[in-house]
Image (tube, rainbow, N blue to C red):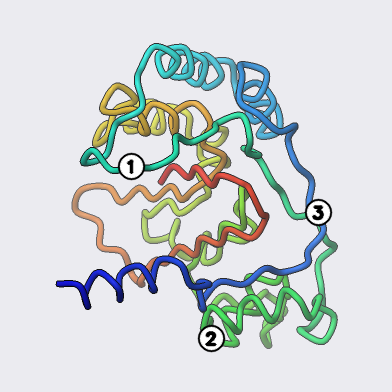
Amino acid sequence: MATKNAQAYEAVNKTYEWGFHSDIEQDFAPKGLSEDTVRFISAKKGEPQWMLDSRLKAFRLWQTLESPDWAKLNLEPIDYQDAFYYAEPKPKPKLGSLDEVDPEILRVYEKLGIPIAEQKMLAGVEELGEDGQPKRRVAVDAVFDSVSVATTFRKELEAAGVIFRSISEAIKEYPELVRKWLGRVVPMTDNYFATLNAAVFSDGTFVYIPEGVRCPMELSTYFRINAENTGQFERS
């Protein structure tokens, strides 16, 4: 038992070997959590009033809840005012090849083990086929910190009856579907962290496959937290 405890303490105290940070320009929300933070996120997303109202309802509920005491462990309480709740990579123009992509972003994809074809999509590279149309080989939604930076195969999936979007886009393009299904599995009243997520989520993936429709390809989502001291609250 003593040996196992020693191994456990050693594992906890050593530097996490798989962690890394990428030096990419980003915009942040002001640090801290308040109604202003919730309004900031909603405004950044250009959301309709009903979505802002839902966020504010969740935030006001969260303020009345107590943080869970996980298994009576001796852990320091989370300081929710000492974090950023929104971080967005500064937008880049569309690129013609991987040679034009910021090498730091490419290193991120390489470290994550993302195939080269998917790297091109996620980096914003637009390759054209013989018909002059962009090649679409990968169905993936990539979320970098607080925003979806790329979603592929949209038109092909829509032709099959499948909607594949970032949640931010779906809120504006398919509001009735989002209002019907958002929070149906895990409602904002489910638990402390579900309530917080409902207030400050920044992006995520929206997939709608109607009954009787078969999705023609595999769908994937990549989530990457890069900015230090930033909470990634995604809603998919």
Q: Which residue is at a point 25% across and 69% down the rendered structure image? A: 5
Which amino acid does the dot numbered 1 rest on?
Answer: Asn
Q: On residue 90, which mark appears?
A: 3
Residue 85: give x, y in percent of width and height. 62, 37
Q: Is residue 9 left or right of residue 159?
A: left
Residue 11 picture quarter: bottom left
> Do residues under tags 3 and 2 come within 8 Å of each other at their CB atoms?
no
Mark 3 or 2, nearer chain start: 3
> Do residues under tags 1 and 2 come within 8 Å of each other at their CB atoms?
no
Can you identify the residue that label 1 sits on?
74
Which amino acid does the dot numbered 3 rest on?
Answer: Lys
> Do residues under tags 3 and 1 come within 8 Å of each other at their CB atoms?
no
Question: Which secondary structure, mark 2?
Answer: loop
- Using the image, determine if residue 160 lies above or below residue 132: above
Q: Which residue is at a point 19% across and 53% down the rendered structure image? A: 212
Residue 45 picture quarter: top right
Which amino acid does the dot numbered 2 rest on?
Answer: Pro
Q: Is residue 184 left or right of residue 36?
A: left
Question: Which secondary structure, mark 1?
Answer: loop
Check disc 1: other Cα within 10 Å, few if <14, some if 14-19, many if 20+.
few
What is the C-alpha distance between the residues marked 3 and 1? 39 Å
Q: 44 or 47, which is in the foreground?
A: 44
